[in-house]
Image: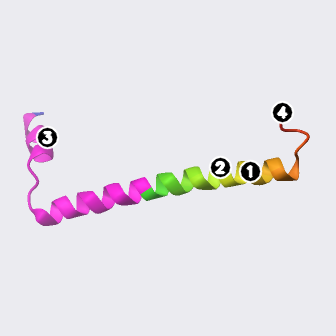
């Protein structure tokens, strides 16, 4: 467990740190895109069926 913690705290090199940053950015952008698409689909649904939404 201590080895895993040491690996997480101290990156091996700048390349590993950069990869981690890119990975985090990809996860964040995909999450935001999913949220925006869900909101847009919900908005289109409300426009299409205004009487059902209450």
Q: Are marks 1 and 3 in contact (CB under 8 Å)?
A: no
Quarter that holds the N terminus: top left
What segment is highlighted magenta in the picture? Answer: 2-28
Rendered image: mark on residue 54: 4
Rendered image: mark on residue 4: 3
Query: Disc 1 on helix, strand or loop?
Result: helix
Answer with left or right where residue 38 lies relative to residue 7. Answer: right
Q: Residues within 10 Å of mark 4 (few under 14, many from 20)?
A: few
Who comes first in sequence, dot 2 or dot 3? 3
Q: CA distance from mark 2 to mark 3?
A: 39 Å
Residue 21 in magenta stretch: yes
Rendered image: mark on residue 3: none
Answer with left or right where residue 46 lies relative to residue 25. Answer: right
Q: CA distance from mark 1 to mark 3?
A: 45 Å
For the residue pair 25 and 13, the one nearer the viewer reads as: 25
Q: CA distance from mark 4 to mark 2?
A: 17 Å
Quarter that holds the C terminus: top right
Q: Are marks 1 and 2 in contact (CB under 8 Å)?
A: yes
Q: CA distance from mark 4 to mark 1?
A: 13 Å
Q: Residue at coordinates 80% horizontally, 50% vertically from top-left?
A: 45
The image position of residue 15, as x and y in percent, is: 15, 66
Answer with left or right where residue 18 lies relative to residue 36. Answer: left
For the residue pair 10 and 46, the one nearer the viewer reads as: 46
- Which residue does the numbered mark 2 point to in the structure image? 39
Q: CA distance from mark 1 to mark 2?
A: 6 Å
Who comes first in sequence, dot 4 or dot 3? 3
The image position of residue 10, as x and y in percent, is: 8, 49
Q: Residue at coordinates 9% horizontally, 62% vertically from top-left?
A: 13
The image position of residue 42, as x and y in percent, is: 72, 48
Q: CA distance from mark 4 to mark 3?
A: 51 Å
């Amino acid at each position: 467990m201590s080895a895993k913690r040491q690996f997480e705290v101290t990156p091996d090199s700048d390349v590993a740190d950069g990869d981690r940053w890119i990975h985090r950015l990809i996860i964040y952008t995909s999450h935001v895109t999913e949220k925006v698409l869900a909101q847009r689909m919900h908005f289109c649904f409300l426009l299409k069926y205004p009487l059902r939404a209450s």
